[in-house]
Image (cartoon, rainbow, N blue to C red):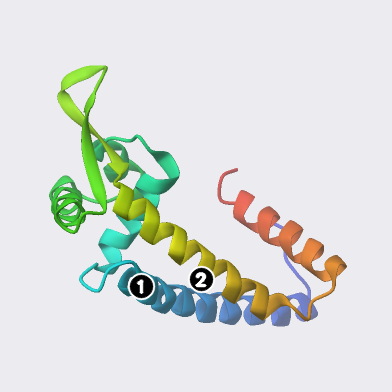
């Protein structure tokens, strides 16, 4: 690992602080988003719902693996999401004993409303940024996120 100079150390500390601040904001936003989707939806269920939305059809075991959750917790969240009318279960064509998870029509509708809301908020926050600044931010954020997959 390459060491950074004193100015780099100062920047690294600022980055760390800003990332922690961002993480707190993301958690708070996830709780707000869960309530926007359904007033009884918990933040953990929101995470499961978003995973299913991005990966449907998917199986509960895939949710367990991808979100690093235990089977019991995923099972409870899936049951609640089904009870709230946000998820549906369909037969898995490759394994008759298993089910696949998909968004229900109501879940699809509520997530579309949420995505419009999130997009409007993001556009509002970034409206004063230049196209070049947006492109640079997108590139750097992508590079940072890719460093976790390397």
Q: Quadrant of residue 107?
A: bottom left
Disc on res. 117: 2
- Say left or right for 16 vs 61: right
Residue 58, x across and y down, in percent:
33, 35
Residue 141, x across and y down, in percent:
67, 61
- Labels 1 and 2 touching (C-beta < 8 A): yes
Mark 1 surroundings: few (<14), some (14-19) or many (≥20) residues within 10 A = some
- Image: 115 above or below 40: above
Secondary structure under the numbered disc 2 in the rendered image = helix
Quadrant of the frame with the C terminus: top right
- Image: 7 above or below 63: below
How far separated are the C-alphas under marks 1 and 2? 10 Å
Q: Nearer the viewer, residue 93 or 104?
A: 104
Q: Quadrant of residue 6?
A: bottom right
- Say left or right for 3 vs 43: right
Query: Which residue is depicted at the point 29% across and 46% down?
Result: 104
Query: Which residue is depicted at the point 67% across and 55% down?
Result: 142
Q: Nearer the viewer, residue 121 or 136?
A: 121
Q: How many marks?
A: 2
Disc on res. 36: 1
Query: Which residue is depicted at the point 34% across and 50% down?
Result: 67
Residue 91, x across and y down, in percent:
20, 26
């Amino acid at each position: 690992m390459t060491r950074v100079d004193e100015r780099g150390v100062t920047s690294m500390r600022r980055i760390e602080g800003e990332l922690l601040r961002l993480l707190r904001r993301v958690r708070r936003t996830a709780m707000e988003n869960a309530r926007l989707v359904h007033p009884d939806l918990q933040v953990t269920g929101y995470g499961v719902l978003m995973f299913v939305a991005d990966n449907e059809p998917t199986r509960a075991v895939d949710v367990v693996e991808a979100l690093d959750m235990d089977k019991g917790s995923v099972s409870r969240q899936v049951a609640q999401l089904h009870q709230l009318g946000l998820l549906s279960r369909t037969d898995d064509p490759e394994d008759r004993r298993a089910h696949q998870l998909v968004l229900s029509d109501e879940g699809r509708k509520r997530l579309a409303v949420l995505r419009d809301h999130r997009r409007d908020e993001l556009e509002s926050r970034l409206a004063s940024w230049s196209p070049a600044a947006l492109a640079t931010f997108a590139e750097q954020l992508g590079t940072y996120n890719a460093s976790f997959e390397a």
